[in-house]
Amino acid sequence: MIHDPNKVYIFDTTLRDGEQVPGCQLDTNQKVEIAKSLELLGVDVIEAGFPVSSPGDFNSVIELSKAVNDPIICALTRANKNDIDVAADALRYAKRPRIHTGIGSSDFHIKHKFNSTREDILARAVEAVKYAKKYVEDVEFYAEDAGRADIEFLAKMVEAVIAAGATVVNIPDTNGYCLPDQYGSKILFLKENVKNIDNAIISVHCHNDLGLATANSIAGLQNGARQVECTINGIGERAGNTSMEEVVMILKTHKVLGLNTSIDATQFYDISHTVRNQMNMPVQPNKAIVGANAFSHSSGIHQDGFLKNRENYEIIKPEDVGFPDATIVLTARSGRHALKHHLERLGHKLEKEHLDIVYKQFLVLADSKQGINDTDLNQLVALHLA
Ligand SMILES: CC(=O)SCCNC(=O)CCNC(=O)[C@H](O)C(C)(C)COP(=O)(O)OP(=O)(O)OC[C@H]1O[C@@H](n2cnc3c(N)ncnc32)[C@H](O)[C@@H]1OP(=O)(O)O
Ligand SMILES: CC(C)C(=O)C(=O)O
């Protein structure tokens, strides 16, 4: 395998981990529509579902496989033969199929989920990879709960599954437990201590239980991972997954990291809205990159600075992520510069002394309601001139 060492593969799991969110379930047509948008966006891998889980999910993986050409289509399984048989069947039309199999790697999961031993789990992991290899060349292995796993055992497991043929090794922080330096160190340890590690791509799959999913994913990439598993809008089990738009824009903004993706970021705004509409899953206004307020300036000092030079308060251009434009929202925290800007936009050019008077009246009004609109502004000017 020859890889550009600086390329980060984007593995989208909106249709698998994202779709696990209560209320976000999609039918096959909706999944195909989102998958086509993901293909246009430029993702490298689409995790299409967990085929053994239901007839609907099985069918969706079949239809996605037919509808999508470029990205790898990936299906999730547990480490057992039946799940793998069913996944391989669902992937039969995929141009580039991948089976994603795995098992718990932390002592907690080994004891309390599987009532088993490290030796047995290791054997099941290797067996699952070898079995999946009978169907497809591209097999990804996930070491569930790797964030809490003993690092020596994790390294042993990773080495064994690569020897068994895994092309990608996924090191999930399933419970969103790690701090960024802990997670980064884990990836570095594997990079430095697993002797066959260069035969596979290391993947990061982080959950957001402590709000660290994106930070942990970036730490993983800084320490040698080259695939990031993420979702549009950061949706996913419990507090969600790493948000694709955040990771991509961090890599674009911090060129010093020297990492690139094949994503067309100008499509983020549209695809974010497609996903929120199809899944009935609102996005909080302060969500980075795609939230309604991500490019909205609402306090006087910021608004003044922004009007003097956008870059005082804008590290990403809205058009770079397809956002319609930045906005200056008038509130009781706005100053004269912002008010003047909006009055001039409406055709009211006021001398300083008039502006000062209108500003005082504006503040009284703004203290009494949550937002000032164009009608309010026109009335303020009309009252002043009357
Ligand atoms: C880390 C992740 O796997 S994230 C993906 C999570 N997604 C999902 O769970 C959605 C799809 N899941 C489902 O539809 C169902 O849970 C199914 C079809 C997979 C299984 O359903 P059921 O057979 O009724 O089992 P149930 O879900 O209640 O329990 C899970 C079983 O799988 C076992 N299991 C869990 N993970 C794994 C694994 N990676 N490898 C092997 N076995 C596993 C559990 O130990 C348990 O087995 P047990 O019955 O011997 O105790
Ligand atoms: C299936 C795996 C990758 C997962 O979703 C997790 O560990 O969170």
Image: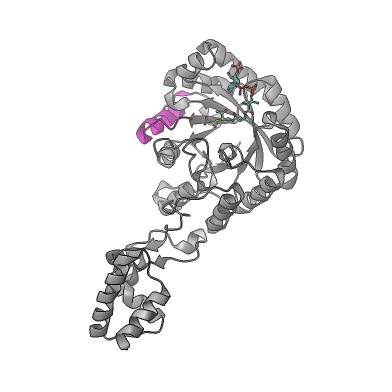
Q: On the rendered structure, is 44 left or right of 213?
A: right
Quadrant location of the N terminus? top right
Q: Nearer the viewer, residue 383 or 174?
A: 383
Q: Is residue 239 visible?
A: yes
Write down the quadrant of residue 328 in the picture. Answer: bottom left
Magenta span of residues = 174-194
Q: Compared to 105, does 306 lie above or below?
A: below
Q: Nearer the viewer, residue 372 or 315?
A: 372
Q: Is residue 135 visible?
A: no
Q: Is residue 182 magenta?
A: yes
x, y percentage for residue 87?
A: 70, 30
Image quarter (top left, top right, bottom left or bottom right) of the C terminus: bottom left
Identity of the residue drawn at 44% across and 51% down: 287
Image coordinates of residue 165 in percent, x first then y, are 62, 25
Where is residue 147, by image quadrant? Answer: top left
125 relative to 316, above or below:
above
